[in-house]
Amino acid sequence: MSRSLNMPGSRPPRTIWEAISPFRLIGELSETRYWMYLLLLPSALLITAVVLYPTVYGMQMSFREMRLNRPDLGNDWVLFKHYVRMINDPIFWVSLRNTAVWVTSSIVLEFLIGLIAALALNRDLPGTKLLAVLILLPYFLPNVVAGHMWALMLDPRMGVINDLLLKVGLLTEYKAWFADPTTAMAAAIIVEAWHSFPFFTLLIMAGLKGIPTDLYKAANIDGAGAFAQLRLITLPMLKTIIAAAVILRVIGLVNSPDLLLILTSGGPGRSTQVLSLYAFQMAYKDFNFGYAGALSVVMFVFLMLFAWAYVRLSKVNQE
Amino acid sequence: MTNISRRSLMKMGGALMAATALTPSLSFAQAASINYWHTFTSQSEQAGLDQVMALFKAAHPDIAVTPENIPNPEFMAKITAAVVSGSRPNVSMVSSERFRDLLAMGALTDISERVAGWERRADFDDARFASISLDGKIYGVPAFTFVDWMYYRKDWFEEAGIAVPTTLAELYDAAVKLTDPAKGRYGFGLRGGPGGQNPIINMMEAFGSPVLHADGTIGLDREKAIAGITYWSDMAKNAAPPSAANDGFRQIIEGFQTGQTAMIYHHTGSYQDIASKLKPGVEFGTMAIPAGPATRVARLAYAYNTITSDENADASWEWIKFWGEPDAAIAFLEKTGYFPASTTAAADPRITGNEMYKAAAETLGFGIPQPSFPGAAGWAESTVLQAFQRILIGEITPEQAVDEMIAGLAEATA
Amino acid sequence: MAQTRSGSKLLWDILSYAIMIVLAIICIGPIIWTFLTSIKVEEDIVTRDMVYFPTRFTFESYVKLWNQSSYPVLVMNSLVVTSLTVLICLLTGSIAAYSFSRFNFKGRTQLMLAYLVVRMFPAVLMIIPLFIVMRNIGLLDSTVGLAVAYTSFLLPLFVWMLKGFFDAAPKELESAARIDGSTRIGAMFRIVIPIARNGLVATCVFVAIAAWNEYLFALMLTTSQGSRTWPVGLQLMVGEFQLPWGMLAAGGMISILPVIILFAIVQRVMVAGITAGAVKG
């Protein structure tokens, strides 16, 4: 007993086959000091092989003159030229503000709806299974389809939502949601929340299943109410899952312009212009890869700061 | 730096390939096999391409054409990646507004000599090659033409007793007269959303401020540009549906089809779509773009086929010039509604005999190419359209919008 | 006391139902609308007099879609890419997540953030260099290449989410196994992974959905002759000079069908996992 406590898994091999068995070798390897790093190796290698070069390439572009349609300007290093331009670029600042609004509102909506849905579904009432599938359905729809279908439903001419709102008396005439700066952003956020809140629902649901029921029983005996239980048991137990979900969603929202591209293309005017859309347009409409690269680096830095601060504040890695 | 990392990556890649023991499934078996990148996506376009390919196959059984369709919005991204990484397609379809950007990237091959020796060269006006030539060198063969024109509700015009406008002033009056928000009717389906940049630029030019001057210099005349922009934004405010700032191609077509708007500005490519909903010659008619105070601006834009790789260039040449054969051009028109670029094909009775195409045939006489310089497309799409939308939502005045456009133009061409 | 408890339970049950039903309606409404659109004739879609229920049903959109898009090939490619992606993620990602969850080593937080860095640089600007990389290693236009590209971007998602689930699995059972002479790796496969099975399945579902619906890389890294996937094929249905609503809606319905089937299967496994895992603290 005491021997296996000291050196778990290292009993002597019984046969020669067992001595050279790969399972045994891996088993022994798993007892070394470097085991945790070895476990990381395959994924780290894969990521590095595929993504390192593109990322570094993208970053170095931001310090170069790189206008693909202007070879006469050359590809020289220009240091911080693009970053200086950014400071004086009103569209950059508008995009930054819009990005903040877009990401914060979407994430808050998605998280709240996702959490409420997961809590309700987790009660395992009869019929929940069917309702769960229905509630998760939006997430399965490709962005292209979700975007276009909402564009159709919100259409100022033949949109069913306009018609319904008219029928219940909330509107007096069809509204052009995406032609008005105030409603354009709001409508886009609602579409985004509709499409992605099941991400949180599914994750939180899976997390809830892992919380030992004894904890709630004990809390019940102590007379803790539902909100107290949520605050004192559920949320702390789901801490890392929620943190991971929030970080991943924030990155996704900041970086992918898909939905806005379909719904508004950044308009009307600049009212839904976000950084990712701006960088995309800079690169593939203006072919100014230098400036687009600089915009991307700024987004990258903001995301890094956010992730770092968030991990710190949410104490994900503290026991 | 780039080279070193690329080489080391290749080594890494070799190891990865050995590890997975997989080879890519590309085959370049046939010597005369070419791939063709294009942006045909709709069902009618696809049918037209199939038709042309079938004809080509009958004429050149030894050349295998592999078409590769790429959605228009991502076309430039994909071709940029292919050019930068040196894996270009043999032949690519290039619209006039993309010519200068792609040429600057070094994507296109000079085919002046081939064109000069081409037996069908005489079928094409010199002007057809204008938007694919620079400094006397030709880089492509026109495949078909987009002719700017307008669609109008013939029945509404007759009901209100309005004549078909021939000047922009008349156009404005007619549009305002036909606008009745209470009835859900608007005079003009103005495209203020995605793709709406071209009419905006055309209005500035019609009022006397072209982007590209006759001597090749680039610049806007502030006062005249403001007049053009004011005209167009007044049109949007007084005669267009409130959704104008977000109305793109789909919305203006649907607005016209469903009887919301009396007129729209587009090109011949949407004819089949409109005719599928409204009766040609009865419910709707077509008209040439009315003349502005300074000049009459209607664009003739071309889709060109270009050779983008030195490999199998002879086979590529056979394919791109085949689009100039009258049989191929007419077959394509019948499936899609796109106008032939060849003068011989355009003189075909199937076109001249159709009353609805009269406005297009007329426009071929006075139509002009789009302003073309590196960065033109980007400036039009991001700066011009955005500034115009900001007028529509009341953020800035036409004067401020023009100043923004001038500043953006200076930056794009700096 | 007991009565108030059951009284409040009833209240919560009613509230739960109310929430679930309202949400289900909001979620399913647009999808029902998509379905209705897919079986309407064009005249009932593009009209100013709202048509809620089709005047006549048609499956023409589905037929056209089927005939034009070589749907079986595209879906097959999508299936292969999705499965490969999930497989590579499982093989490399689950052990990484385990490492982050169970070992407190130097630089752990930094390394975890480093995994995230991969997703932080906007994908649109990585397209060109990524294209070059894929071309150089000869994986352009292959399902493997696409799966590798997806994996590199989905691994962070996989690892981070799975780490959360591993964290939630009690460590006591593992320690007990170690005391009984199990190696670390043995404990991982025999104890931790079975306990975190729900999380593992949920995570795989995410990776699968993300890979299934991905568009930009699929378009950039494949050609129609090679390994083009379904979302790209679907986008190509949506022409620039016409938007066939019926076909788009039909495409949407067709593309969620395999996901729903997968989910139905997975849900059963998930439920089984809950009972088998038997974590009661």
Image: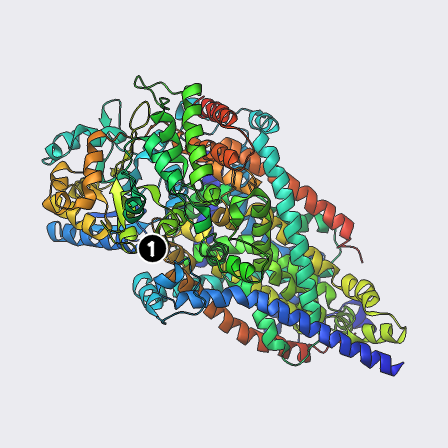
Along the line of sight, which residue is nearer the eye, B403 or B327?
Answer: B403
B403 shown above or below C14: above
In screen coordinates, is B318 left or right of A301? left
Along the line of sight, which residue is nearer the eye, C99 or A295?
Answer: A295
Residue A15 in percent (x, y) is at 63, 76
C277 shown above or below B87: below
User: In the structure shown, which secondary structural element does the residue marked by tag 1 occupy?
Assistant: loop
User: Where is residue C15, by image quadrant?
Assistant: bottom right
Residue at figure coordinates x 45%, y 55% from the top left: C146
Residue A163 in percent (x, y) is at 51, 59
Figure label count: 1
Query: Which quarter shows the N terminus of chain C?
Result: bottom right
The amino acid type of the residue labelled 1 equals Ser
Query: Tag 1, which chain?
Result: C
In screen coordinates, is A211 left or right of B87? right
Residue A138 in percent (x, y) is at 54, 63
Residue A246 in percent (x, y) is at 67, 54
Whether residue C196 is visible to the viewer of this picture, yes or no, is no
Residue at figure coordinates x 69%, y 61% from the top left: C164
In screen coordinates, is C104 left or right of A71? right
User: Where is residue A236, by image quadrant?
Assistant: bottom right
Label 1 sits on residue? C224
User: Where is residue B359, by image quadrant?
Assistant: top left
Of all residues shown, which one is farthest toward the bottom?
Answer: C3
C97 shown above or below A70: below
B349 shown above or below B258: above
Whether residue B196 is visible to the viewer of this picture, yes or no, is yes
